Amino acid sequence: MSTSVAEHGQGAGLSPEHGGHVLRVAGLQSEFRSRRGTVKAVRAVSLELEPGQRVGIVGESGSGKSAFALSVLGLLEPPGYVVGGEVILNGRNIAELDDRQMQTVRGKEISIVFQDPMSALNPVKTIGQQITETIRKHQPQLGKKGARAAAIELLRDVEVPAAGRRIDDYPHQYSGGMRQRVMIAIALANQPNVLIADEPTTALDVTTQAQVLTLLDRLVTERGTAVILITHNLGIVAQFCDVVYVMYAGRVVERAATADLFAHPVHPYTEALLRAVPRPDQLAQGPLPSIPGAPPNLAEVAPGCSFESRCPLGRGHKLCRTEVPVSTAAIGFGSGGATAECHFAKERVAEYLDGDATTA
Amino acid sequence: MSAAAQARTTWFERFAGSIRALMRVLRIIVRDPGLAFAVGLILLLGLIAVLGPVVWNKDPLEIDIGNILAPPSASSPMGTDDVGRDVFARFNQGARISLAVGAAVVVIAGTVGVLIGIAAGVFGRWVDAALMRMVDALLAFPALVLAMAVTVGLGIGLKTATVGIILPSIPFYARLMRSEVIQVRSAVYVEAAAALGAKRGRIIARHVFPNAMTSVPILAAANFGFAILTMAALGFVGLGAQVPTPEWGTMITEGQQYIVTGGWWVSLFPGIGVLLAVVAGSLLADRARDMVDPRRERDI
Amino acid sequence: MLKLVLTRTAASLVAIFGASILAFVLLRVAPADPARLLAGPFATEEVVEAQRVALGLKDSLVSQYFRYIGDFFQGDWGFSFSVGRPVIDQIGSRLPASIELGLYAFIFALVGAVICALLATYRRRRAVDHTINGFALFGLGTPPFWLALIVLLVFFGILDILPGPEGRLSPRQEAPPEVTRMYTIDALLAGQLGTFFDAGKHLLLPALVLGFAPWAFFFRLLRASLLEVSGEQYLATARSKGIRRWTAFRRHALPNAFLPTLTAAGLIFAALLAGSVLVESVYQWPGLGALVRDGVIEQDYAVVQAFILIGAFAYVVVNLVVDILYGVIDPRTRTGSAVTK
Ligand SMILES: Nc1ncnc2c1ncn2[C@@H]1O[C@H](COP(=O)(O)OP(=O)(O)OP(=O)(O)O)[C@@H](O)[C@H]1O
Ligand code: SF4
Ligand SMILES: [Mg+2]
């Protein structure tokens, strides 16, 4: 796996003129309702994914990453509700489909890998039963035997040793890393175009993390699967993703090609994230660094920029306190389509361009 | 500040603190309809038990052959039974008996069970093994069957029946306390080693006590209902209170043969009494458990 | 696996041993005159003396205990003076009626609990959940014998749509040919539909009343278990495969939710056993429970004592079977962990 910042083969960078998106999310909104009020967990998030592209989503805990992923798949359970937006998958809006219609979409066109492999598998069903379930659902023509053969093949593919024997084991007989491989096998069983991986390695130890990530990298490259990788780990983003979305308080506050984001963070939140890591080579490991201050309460939307109370740049500015910043194109960098949600985005881009010009 | 003054302030602060705690409890009760209902029921039954026989001063045992099976009326709100006794007077007296039995079972079984559990947990080894085998033997009987065995063996009556209900209640307290002691014990060994000189028993007590303060009363509330229900069942079978004692279960039996022949009131009211008392106990236990462990109260 | 069966069985044997000592102490050592207790208040002194000899009351406590246990396991459960038959014959003739009633009560409780638990949790409707929960609270708190009387009053006394307290069949209805001695089954086997419906009508009220408390137990357990399980991630995994909500629930949540409720089987058995003593006599149901209550009323304690021992023994056996079954069904105890593999 490549370890330098976003240099691998798949069409790197953002290119809006490149029309064919496998997935285009527009203005997705979801909320959790409770007696104590409504938490607006996802506040009009948009995202584009080209075939085979890898998009990373980073953001601190509670910024709405998982809620976003579940909303895309229509898997948000009460008290969570999707309240607006479009999810165009392979050309049709799946946000409008009902549960019955979604059956043919989930697991076939789009699938997901969850964070905790310990709880994501049913403890009283064998590994084989849980893999064949998705194969039999979407490839009924294979039959029982065929599905089992395909499941063994998948287990081999995700490098589970003695797959033919261990297919009849129960989840508790597998280690955490092996279970996550099984989850990946389940997700990729029907060759979906889009895979959402919600912190797939967070629950694993560091060595296993690297192995699972290498495996995921190989599998999606072979299959040409587009990936949305949700993570806390900037190092993983640097290694794995073409484009990065930075989420803060339910909003995408910045998006850029990976190399650009690391070189020129436009949004002060992104900059703070990167600055909190002392040296660039330490990016490769460790969770998201912490930033002083607390994220805002998503139950009560205050006027102004949601990052204002923690923003070194905007603090005290009247504009930041009263006006919600809109998404601003950060034009001028190597690839187009980068945006940042900050009143000072243009100025910051200009500064970078000046700086680059002087150093060049 | 003198030592005495200091003692006074702490005393006063403690007093104010407990008042505040009481207010907090009251607020919790008022906000939760289920809890308020349960507490209200228990207060109501308690009121009936204490004041009922005083206010409604008819003799629950007085036979009046001229007034047999009279339906409810102003002079006897719950009617009269097959020998003309006033059912309302008997109902009030029955509340006294039932609540007293419930309280006795909870206090005695609770004390014995808690002590057994603590002993088993603290001493471990053979003490634990021996005590737990005894508890297992008690648990090898269905509760009512054990109560029946006690009354058959020791002689039928209200007192032996109460003993018969206490025995199957003990294991629950014992097991609860034992597990709480064992839970903190392993952690406490570490602390005890660090805090040289501190008595192990005292440290365990300090850790066990706060948990037990919530879990034992919850169990007691459920046990209270169980005791009243079982006493009524024993009375109905004929192994509990004997006629003419106005125990609710016995009263239901007395009305059994008149239920469809036009004397429904004799059995109906004591049954409602049992029902309310048991529901109050279970509901109280349920709500308290949900409060202690909010995870149980899922948003649905 | 074998180890599991053996350790559980050993633990049960210890419990039975403790229980037998307790029963021995309560029923043989504690009473002032156990022989008189068994022979009944009207027995002559010679009869009581013969009983004393039979019980070996003059021997040491240890040999008395072994005789007590030996008698029990040999089926020598004493003599019922009120009917003039050995207790074991009495119980044998009463058992089928109780088993039939208990079986229907159990089915009502089980099916009702599953349906209600699903209604209360699956769609997360608060009002439905609260209603059923409240009902279950009544199930736990209602004295079964009282409820038996009240429904009798309503459905027989007032509405007159179900039979009164007249046992298993209408007075003029003949019993079906004996096969299982459960009338509904025997009637069907013999093709006697009329008898079947008559038996069913007579079963309905007692079975519903007897099943009420077990239903409440089981419902509460299953509901809590389902709530616990319905938040599990593996349900989301199943749904992410394109499995429909209900199918995912049925396939993945239900088996997981059922497993812990198995442990309640012992409690449910106990509720049915105790309930039979409390409910049968109200309906003149000729079962074991009615026999026991009659025994108390006639002071025929041989019957009552036999019931106590059998009840405790059956209870331990049920708990043991359930314990082992639990181990067999749950793959986490059946198979080793990743470490041992
Ligand atoms: N079931 C729920 N009920 C109520 N609020 C919820 C629920 N699940 C999530 N939330 C709220 O929604 C917001 C977004 O949560 P989400 O799980 O999407 O965050 P996340 O970015 O995935 O965090 P993490 O990095 O910890 O996984 C949080 O404020 C959280 O409190
Ligand atoms: S808008 Fe203002 S407060 Fe918000 S990030 Fe930009 S500078 Fe900071
Ligand atoms: Mg998350």
Image (cartoon, rainbow, N blue to C red):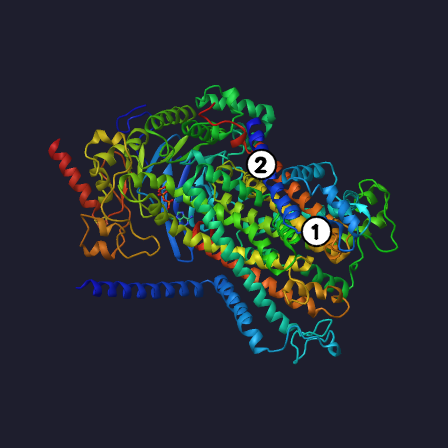
- Evaluate whether label 2 is on the same chain as label 1: yes
Give the mark count.
2
Q: Quadrant of residue A350?
A: top left
- Left or right: A225 with respect to C21? left
Host chain of mark 2: C
Host chain of mark 1: C
Q: CA distance from mark 2 to mark 1?
A: 28 Å
Q: Quadrant of residue A352?
A: top left
- Left or right: A334 with respect to B89? left
- Residue highlighted by disc 1: C276
* SS of the residue under disc 2: helix
Q: Residue at x 71, y 45 (%)?
A: C306
Circle 1 residues within 10 Å: few <14, some 14–19, many ≥20: many
In the rendered image, the residue lying farthest to the left is: A358
Q: Quadrant of the N terminus of chain C?
A: top right
Front one among A59 and C253: C253
The percent coordinates of residue B34 (x first, y second) are: 50, 62
Q: Is residue B18 shown to the viewer in this render?
A: yes
Front one among B6 and C81: C81
- Residue highlighted by disc 2: C14
What's under tag 1, amino acid-wise? Ser
In the rendered image, the vertical position of residue C315 relative to residue A203, given as above or below: below
The percent coordinates of residue C254 (x first, y second) are: 57, 41
The percent coordinates of residue A200 (x first, y second) are: 38, 33
Circle 2 residues within 10 Å: few <14, some 14–19, many ≥20: some
